[in-house]
Image (cartoon, rainbow, N blue to C red):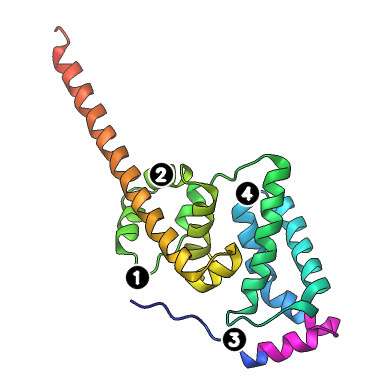
Amino acid sequence: MAETNPSPDPAEMALIDQARNDKDAFGELYARYHDKIYNYIYYRTGNAEDAEDLTAKVFMRAMQHIGNYEDKGVPFSAWLYRIAHNLVANWHRDNSRRQMLSLDDIAQWRVAEDSPEFTAQLMEDKAMLLSSIRRLPADRQELLTLKFVENLSNAEIGEIMGRSEGAIKSLYHRTLLALREDFEQQMDDGRERTSEKKRGFFRRPF
């Protein structure tokens, strides 16, 4: 199924133009996007206090630079996510941390209909899938979060991560392949351990 990118909302573009010189108009943008940006940052940091602090910094930076905002054919939210992406990257670097997703995080993922294989894995064993996801590089974990938590298009994700839409499609494809291979390896290892336990049981003297 071909992915369609959302067109900029003319009413929102008018609000953005107004917000360049009107704090009340910027306040409307803040109210509209605060929760989405907070949720994204919380998924990336796993800490409510840090998420609140970074979210405030995102909107402070957005207010300072909204005069330089340019419509690139993706929603305004992509620009905010891009600011959040950079702040979170700095946060991880400064704290020498790497966010580890939890089972609760995975349970809230909403997988699109064009990803049937990923959906099957998600339904089959969330704990095993989580283990596979945690072994992915940070950028691939972020890609999955943006796609399945934020439900963003490839074009929006590309804008946030500083890559082309084609590069995001390629990265997504490679990520799903890596997950499938790791998932299958875990299943094979599990079957092998089960078989060894059975052989050990039948070798026991009675």
Q: Say which residue label 4 marks.
A: 46
Q: How far apart are marks 3 and 4 (CA)?
A: 31 Å
Q: Which amino acid does label 4 sit on?
A: Gly
Disc assigned to residue 8: 3
Q: Say which residue label 1 marks.
A: 113
Q: Which of marks 1 and 4 is nearer the N terminus?
A: 4
Front disc: 3 or 4:
3
Q: Say which residue label 2 marks.
A: 132
Q: Which of marks 1 and 3 is nearer the N terminus?
A: 3
Q: Specify start and end residues of the magenta stretch as a single range.
A: 12-26
Q: Earlier in the sequence, mark 3 or mark 4?
A: 3
- Residue in the image at 58% along x and 79% along y: 74
The C terminus lies in quadrant? top left
* Residue at the extreme top: 205
SS assignment at label 4 = loop
Give coordinates of residue 168: x percent, y percent.
Answer: 47, 64
122 or 71: nearer the viewer: 71
Q: Which of marks 2 and 1 is nearer the N terminus?
A: 1
Q: How crowded is mark 3: few (under 14 residues within 10 Å), some or many (20 or more)?
A: some
* 70 sits to left or right of 8: right
Q: Distance between the residues labelled 1 and 3?
A: 24 Å
SS assignment at label 1 = loop
Give coordinates of residue 86: x percent, y percent.
Answer: 68, 58
Q: How crowded is mark 1: few (under 14 residues within 10 Å), some or many (20 or more)?
A: few
**Residue 76 belongs to magenta span:** no
Give coordinates of residue 137: x percent, y percent.
Answer: 50, 46
Residues under numbered marks 1 and 3 in contact, where contact means CB atoms less than 8 Å apart: no
In the depicted structure, whether residue 135 falls above or below residue 1? above
- Residue in the image at 48% along x and 44% along y: 134
